[in-house]
Image: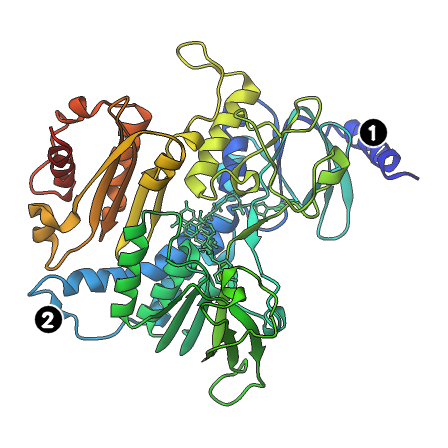
Amino acid sequence: MAPDTQADTRAQGARAQGAQVDVIVIGAGPAGENVAGRCADAGLAVTIVERELVGGECSYWGCIPSKTLIRPGEVLAAARRVPGAAAAVTGALDPAAVFTRRDRLVGGFSDDSQVPWLTDKGVTLVRGTGRLTGRPRHVEVTAADGDRRVLIASRAVVVATGSRATVPPIPGLAEADPWDNRSATAARSVPRRLVVLGGGAVGAELAQAFRRLGSAEVTLVEGSPRLLAREEEFAGEQVRAAFEADGITVRLGTRAVEVRRSRPDSATPRGPVTVTLADAAGPDARGDDARGDDAGGEAVVADEILVAVGRTPATGDLGLAAVGLPPGKFIEVDDRLLAVGVDGGWLYAVGDVCGRALLTHMGKYQARIVADVITGRRDAAGEPARDVADGLAIPRVTFTDPQVSAVGLTERAAREAGLAVRAVSVATGGVAGASVRGEGITGTSKIVVDESRRVLVGATFTGPDTQEMVHAATIAIVAAVPVERLWHAVPSFPTVSEVWLRLLEEYGL
Ligand SMILES: Cc1cc2nc3c(=O)[nH]c(=O)nc-3n(C[C@H](O)[C@H](O)[C@H](O)COP(=O)(O)OP(=O)(O)OC[C@H]3O[C@@H](n4cnc5c(N)ncnc54)[C@H](O)[C@@H]3O)c2cc1C
Ligand SMILES: NC(=O)c1ccc[n+]([C@@H]2O[C@H](COP(=O)([O-])OP(=O)(O)OC[C@H]3O[C@@H](n4cnc5c(N)ncnc54)[C@H](O)[C@@H]3O)[C@@H](O)[C@H]2O)c1
């Protein structure tokens, strides 16, 4: 029997069992859950399909555990900046207690506490792996025991299957069984020596977290010339300096060309890992992962290697080819989050899998938009819902110390987009609010102003605790508040938000 006919037959059975719903969501991470919840709130019948844990990567192996591992070191560093409190910091962090708290915040790697949020809204949870059959609005679900059934949606199917860590084809890497974000955030011990491949958000946050939890040697290897390469240049430079002050070895502009894990010994139960780095000036440093004849420079020996070089969309086994889309790729969407290239207007994608912004809050925003598209909800002006924020103001916070908190465009990206911008910067530590919080607070606050409209298009704040500064900038950008009007938004004294006043003065107001 042809696959489609089989699917048809099962579909008939499913219909007879009353399995037709308005909306099917595949993947119950933060994006999928929010699509389901908002559609259900609007009165639609929704089924959500999840093959692992309701809550997705963010809840168990992403945002929550990583921030839980970072927080203790951040608290100690904050105390050490305050004379009087610093003297009270006499001991080291207790990793066992940190891991216990992590376990609690991830619900013991169980979704028991997350499922009621869905079921209370009337959403039906189906455990299993969802796959598009090729027929419009048909999803085949395979349960863990192999049982298969086909669900049919009357309105829409929303893909929210997220992403997983990319493991690049570096010789010996896969065989070395490296840590990815899952193994690192779920760790139960602190490796004495850790090598981290990738100086983006995942690599930077976890390198510092493990160093502060007690790793004696942490080496961070980043292929491009600076950390957090998509942010303002000063951000990566300041994070590098802080990491080096923390005792982390930062290797920029080079890559691993070979990885080898040796047999276990008494000190290293999984066996030590030797990572050979390319000569920084060699061809591998420019992006070729395969080892060349002339490759090979410094070797770093560690107990664990963490791979944090980016994400691969979870679309390899989703049946995308059956609807005419390339498997294993991000699903391209339009501003209604509708998959581009699929006829009939029934397939949507949100969250990491659509590749617009690999951030929980943006996935949840896309989820709210897509739910409004599906339910036909309009705004007060009668306009249909569409994704505005992804093209305008994506807020992002990298929870290193110093934090890098940014929204919208960097100065360079704005210029590359053809905008006539003027940028001004001030020291984050230069206001009374920072002095009160601690000694020696550094960092930079910068705004990027579109000169033709006199509105912000980007802002970056580096320094401790800047995560709470970024939302003001997000509002200024999204609301297109002219700088002359921002002048009247008076920051409280003594808060770090006074950098806004300094920035506007620097701009000339
Ligand atoms: C270490 C780390 C730290 C991070 N920290 C932050 C942070 O601080 N802030 C932030 O905003 N973002 C952070 N992120 C990013 C954030 O985790 C993701 O952007 C977010 O989880 C994406 O949500 P999602 O719902 O699109 O996908 P996911 O969270 O990946 O969820 C997808 C779900 O779909 C399920 N699924 C996949 N395929 C199928 C299928 N075929 N059938 C059924 N179910 C399926 C999966 O099991 C999963 O539960 C971090 C990421 C990492 C790795
Ligand atoms: N605080 C947060 O919001 C947070 C935290 C973690 C992750 N995230 C999200 O998760 C996404 C994925 O994070 P990520 O850090 O895995 O990816 P990333 O794309 O942000 O960074 C990967 C880095 O690895 C480097 N790289 C690539 N190949 C390499 C190689 N072979 N050797 C050395 N370096 C190499 C790249 O130059 C890049 O700087 C981010 O884009 C972010 O949106 C967010």
Q: Which sits earlier in the primary sequence, circle 1 or circle 2? A: 1
Q: Position of residue 55 (x, y in %)?
A: 50, 46
Q: Nearer the viewer, residue 87 or 118?
A: 87
Which of label 1 and label 2 is nearer to you?
A: 2
Q: Is residue 26 above or below residue 154?
A: below
Which residue is depicted at the point 6% across and 65% down? Answer: 84
Quarter where residue 494 is shown: top left
Q: Position of residue 17 (x, y in %)?
A: 77, 30
Q: Is residue 188 visible?
A: no
| Neighbour tally class for label 2: few under 14, some 14-19, many 20 plus, Cα within 10 Å | few
The residue at the point 62 percent across, 68 percent down is 174
Amino acid type assigned to the residue bearing label 2 in the image: Ala
- From the viewer's perspective, is 147 left or right of 345? right
Distance CA(mark 1)–CA(mark 2): 72 Å
Q: Residues within 10 Å of mark 1 (few under 14, many from 20)?
A: some
Q: Is residue 130 left or right of residue 445?
A: right
- Asked whether residue 230 is in view, the answer is yes
The residue under label 1 is 12
Label 2 belongs to which residue?
Answer: 87
The extreme top residue here reads 382
